[in-house]
Amino acid sequence: MTDTPPPFLPFALPEIGDEEIAEVVDSLRSGWVTTGPKARRFEQDFVAFLGDPSLHAVAVNSATAGLHLALEALGIGPGDEVITTTHTFTATAEVVRYLGADVKLVDIDPATLNIDPAAVEAAITPRTRALIPVHYAGLAADMATLGDTARRHGLAVVEDAAHALPTTHAGHLVGTLDSAATVFSFYANKTITTGEGGMLVTRDAALAKRAQVMRLHGMSRDAFDRFRSDKPSWFYEIVAPGFKYNLTDIAAALGLHQLKKARAFQARRAAIAEAYDAAFAGLPVITPPRPAEGDLHAWHLYVLRLADDVHVSRDTLIERLFAAGIGCSVHYIPLHLQPYWRDRYALLPEMFPHSQHAYERMLSLPIYTRMTDADVARVALAVREALR
Ligand SMILES: *Cc1c(COP(=O)(O)O)cnc(C)c1O
């Protein structure tokens, strides 16, 4: 009578195919293991994927690095303020502090869990220089309103698109919108992965050039190119104290093939979201917000919220799912609750009522391409039983 329990279903797993493995092996055999031809090709393919040849793509070793480079290139520094959502990962905000500028955290729209444009408007001061919207879970932020606010106040917009490949806003892919820069993540659990990696995209040639120089020690390729004709190839110039943020060819080898699969990955994730939504109909839960008609949601996360009248707490629900062999997570513990941000800016939960309320009642369910239909059904059934 003893059933062997089903194996533990992790919260997230990457899907790495034979193509990726062969491409990595090819890099290893070629001897070109750091930044080289594959990183360059990954940048070119990324621009082709976004379908806008006026874009520049700068491959980096994380989205955090890309966000830092974008803000650095915009000249953000001490005395400046940058507005972003409290309902994000700390990377979105920490890069502002790297540059000595200050972070103004604002609340979310409870319907979308994205940054609330009205809260942004209210947080603008004469010191505000930039906004960092996050396309939370893979659903586009209200870029029309945020863009309008930014234009009226002369602010730069840097999109944190770590969740948003591929996501569209009013029919346009995130990455092609009207922002100073957009930064994608290829961290292990993101919609495509290079293990660690990121991509900064921009239409601003000067911003792209600065990011290219600063991602590799502040070495000026311009100078290199200028002197190439009359100097041997050992010559380079350091024009700034740059960083070490370049993407390796080993990582880019993964990215080349992951990118080709990004559309199919999105379709599978959307199908899982659809199946969850159907399975949770009638339960005392709030299913995730949907994109506008015709728009794409990247479905990096499937965030379920408990209705206000449920007797089961979020923590209990996660414990019950764990006992049933299902990994879950919470995205995010809002920044206003994290000691560093809370203490530095004297933040209180009452200042962020929508983020706080959502945080207390939310959990993220597994949603990834390697899940079978049976895995999805198992999660849905476990949620139903855990809520009983
Ligand atoms: C993952 C993530 C990042 C950081 O991405 P890395 O590539 O790990 O640096 C930034 N912002 C958000 C919202 C993320 O989820």
Image (cartoon, rainbow, N blue to C red):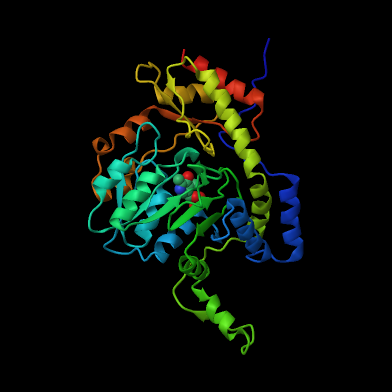
Instruction: Give the left or right position of residue 5, taking residue 273 as reference.
Output: right
Residue 246 vertical position relative to residue 386 in the rendered view, above or below: below
User: How many marks are shown on the rendered structure?
Assistant: 0
Where is residue 366 shown, x and y percent of the image? Answer: 55, 31
User: Is residue 77 placed above or below 281 in the rendered structure?
Assistant: below
**The one of 203 and 318 positioned closer to us in this rendering:** 203
Q: Is residue 236 visible?
A: no
Query: Splitting the image into 4 quarters, where does residue 8 fall?
Result: top right
- What is the x, y in percent for residue 70? 44, 61
Q: Quadrant of residue 106?
A: top left
Q: Residue 40 location in percent, x, y?
A: 63, 63
Q: Can residue 321 be seen in this view?
A: yes
Taking the spot 34% from the left edge, 49% from the top edge, the residue there is: 148
Q: Residue 111's spot in the image, x, y percent?
A: 38, 31
Q: In this view, does 102 lie to the left or right of 7?
A: left
Q: Which residue occupies 66% across, 41% down?
A: 15
Tell me: 228 left or right of 308: right
Q: Where is the N terminus found, in terms of image quarters?
A: top right
The single residue placed furthest to the bottom in the displayed view is 230
- At 59% from the left edge and 34% from the top edge, which residue is drawn? 269
Query: In the picture shown, does residue 240 fall above or below 29?
Result: below
Q: In this orientation, which residue lies closer to the viewer: 214 or 229?
A: 229
